[in-house]
Amino acid sequence: MTAGSAPEAAGPGTRIYCADWVLPITSQPVSGGAVAVADGVIKAVGASDEVTRTYPEAEVVEFHDAIILPGFVNCHCHLEYGVFRGLLDNKNFGSWILDFIDYKRRLSPDDYLASALLGASECAASGITTVADSMHSGQSLTAIRKTGLRGRVYLEVFGIDDASLSETVSKLEATLDELQEQENGKVEVGIFPHATYTVSANLYNAISRLARERDKKVATHLAESRDESTYIKSGSGVLALDFREKVGWENIICEPFGVTPVKYLQQWDVYGTDFMAVHCVHVEARDIDILAKNDVAIAHCPKSNAKLGCGIAPLPDFLKAGIRVGLGTDSPASSNTMDMFGEMRTAIYLHRGTHHDATILGAADCLKMATMSGAAALGMDDRIGSLEAGKQADMIAVDMEYSHFTPVNDPYSSLVYGASQDDIFFTMVAGNPIYDKKVFTTLDGREINARAEEVKKKLSHAS
């Protein structure tokens, strides 16, 4: 906006949100800023006196001691696993996934809906406005719509036995047909071949062809653990033995491929412009070249990777290679909370510590990854990720009325190093407040928590 702009007639429902700071992300922070919103779209961003002068008839909402910024983009999560938090805290990845299978088998579809609603409500209360969710039971889509979030729901696919390839693909197509009826302007459906150790090369290839035919986005867990790399390179380890026995695949031949997981998928023509790899912890320099060459986006999940003992992904190398990288919380089963502030801090501390370099990542870099860069990783940066006129009104407000914010010298620093999900008090998606003054407007939080407690009882006896 420029000073002296002619006043505009405020349309029906036009609101101006004012705060001590507004962080557009794509431009400099605005002290004493404001955002004008109408019809679900941002109309103006700038100094509060300029915005209110431009829209003199608009309703003004004052957020005192607050920072307004774009809603967070969670590039990888599993909403359906909300009730699993804290059950497997001290397990390495191989043992964790074996035990997790037992827990998953104890829940019904209704239980998974309760769990997904718990996850979706946590996202809304944490300032996450867009989720890229990997969905197995089918309940995440319902939970996202009920909560009012924006999202891409990736339908998980499993299948290592090529004798069932045709049947698996046919079932996938039928499920996509059903789910697409629930797509709208805020929610879309993608495909998620689970991982290199649960999806055969031929099924990966078939999914890639189907995705291109249907113009669907694809994502997969890739190079997450050393166990996965061992499985792909040598056909051995816990994923080749204990895991396959657990899921009933022990009689299917497991071939060593002698390459990294990233190279393995390249050989099967899996990558495309709409592909996102989740994790990419165990990658080599040539793997990074492959990912960059194929414009593969990456969902970086630092907390989950560290907690499961998987390692630390080479984030600085990804960024240096020009790869689109967004942050993901993964599921509460592995990272416990879906707190994007925690993910940002973990990323900074891990990479600065391992590189012995305090300049390796900054607060502004990580906040961009949690917003605009995350939107770019999902191919949504033309609509969301920053506060700009014409973009969707997905924004959040953070309460600064506490000692850990005082004084605010740099709003980026205050948010990334000092804030947590508990400091969010307002979340808006497409102009609709879904969490206001720490109260859900679309859900009954107490009912969701009570139902989650009931589901937890089923898990307490899991073996």
Image (spheres, grey):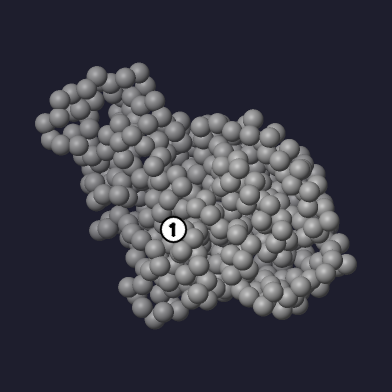
Compared with residue 45, is residue 163 higher up or lower down, i.e. above or below? below
Considering only vertical position in the picture, is 389 above or below 300?
above
Between residues 51 and 368, which one lies in front from this camera angle?
368
Q: Is residue 404 above or below residue 53?
A: below
The residue that label 1 is drawn on is 324
- Please give the name of the residue rendered at 23% of the width and 39% of the height, measured from the top-left corner: 46
Q: In the image as oriented, which residue stretches furthest toward the right?
A: 251
**Quadrant of res 236:** bottom right
Q: Nearer the viewer, residue 153 or 439?
A: 153
On screen, residue 461 above or below 9: below
Number of numbered discs on residues: 1
Residue extending farthest to the left is 4
Nearest the camera: 289 or 243? 289
- The residue located at (28%, 21%) in the rendering is 10
Q: Outermost residue, bottom direction?
A: 356
Residue drawn at point x = 73 percent, y = 75 percent? 256
Question: Residue 360, position in %: x, y?
Answer: 36, 72
Question: Measured from the top left, where is residue 152 in percent x and y?
Answer: 56, 43
**In the picture provided, is 417 more to the left or to the right than 169?**
left
Residue type (three-letter) at the residue carrying disc 1 = Arg
Left or right: residue 334 compared with residue 74: right
